[in-house]
Image (cartoon, helix red, strand yellow):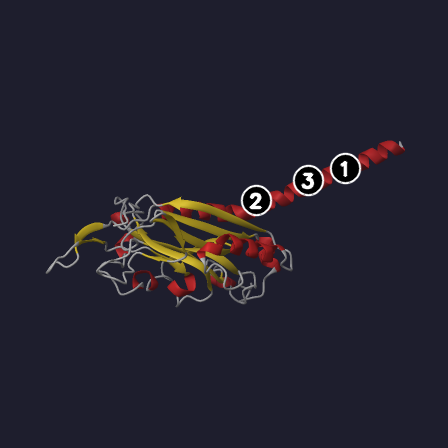
Amino acid sequence: MAVLVIVAGLGLSIMTATTSAWNVNKARMGAFAEARVAFETLTHRLSQATLNTYWDYDNRGTPTRYLRKSELHFIQGRAADLLPAVPNTSTDAVFFVAPLGITDTTNYQPLVKMLSACGFYVRFDADSNRPAFLDGKIAKRYRFRLYQFLQPGERLGIYPPPQGNNWFQNDILNWSFPMADNVIGLILRVKYPVAGGSTVVSTYDSRLNPNPNLPPATFNQLPPVISATLVVIDESSARRLENGANPPAILPDPPAFLLPGQYDQDISDWETKLQNFVPKIAYRVLSADIHLRGAKWSSN
């Protein structure tokens, strides 16, 4: 009987430990499911970016050569630089135009390839979808969130060509919505061919043309490949880090991710910081290389 009791106790202990581990892993998988779905949406929509590039004279009055031209725009860089009027943004952001067929009314729904402005960025703020009657009764839930900017085609502000980045900056808060909570970072790298190989850059602007007589290869061209990385924590960790409107100190230490060649080391350093963070937090890193179907790269 004594041996039987010991064996039964060991069996119960093993079953309890196994059940507990399974429940913990299931909860973590569920916590990161929203981020995975958002990441799939990001990769799919980025792959649809277009510039609709064409060739035209450099000067129609006194032409000397052909140049690539486009009325559209693709820009990627630090979120704080691209969105100076939006508080508490972090890491990178990207904005572009794609034939998504997004409309604001039913009048244009048959136009399934209508151009829409799109973009992605990370911001720390309060939940914006809560009912107004909860104000003053339940504290606001501040989180890092992945946002999508999705401007309907009939409201597309890129025509006529605006000044600078006004085509998305002026409307960023009107057409942005949170895709996933607890996304603490979005890191983007652009890859494109150069003579003798390829290069990786942390910022890209298809309108940047410092030399009109000899514009760079990136002028009015989409990059062939974008490397995207999402860093996500789970909701249990986010609750442990809550400090009202003050964001927790879990972002990468500067000057991380400023030099493209140190990307792997910067990711490793950030993971080390997250692993050693107190209180303990659970995180995931999601990465993918996105091939832009509209890119027809030419070095001319």
Extreme-front residue of the structure: 196
Q: What element carries label 3?
A: helix
Q: How crowded is mark 1: few (under 14 residues within 10 Å), some or many (20 or more)?
A: few
Q: Is residue 230 left or right of residue 204?
A: right
Residue that carries the numbered disc 1 in the rendered image:
12
Q: Tell me which corner region of the image, top left, top right, bottom left or bottom right, holds residue 220.
A: bottom left
Dot placed on the residue nearer the N-terminal end, 2 or 1: 1
Is residue 104 in view from this perspective? no
Residue 86 vertical position relative to residue 223 in the rendered view, above or below: below
Q: How crowded is mark 2: few (under 14 residues within 10 Å), some or many (20 or more)?
A: few
On residue 29, the disc is 2
Q: In this view, does 181 lie to the left or right of 236?
A: left
- Locate residue 44, reporting x and y percent: 39, 45
Residue that carries the numbered disc 3 in the rendered image:
19
Which residue is more in the foreground, 137 or 112? 112
Residue 255 vertical position relative to residue 180 in the rendered view, above or below: below
Q: Tell me which corner region of the image, top left, top right, bottom left or bottom right, holds residue 210.
A: bottom left
Residue occupying image coordinates x 29% and y 47%: 297
**Tag 3: amino acid:** Thr
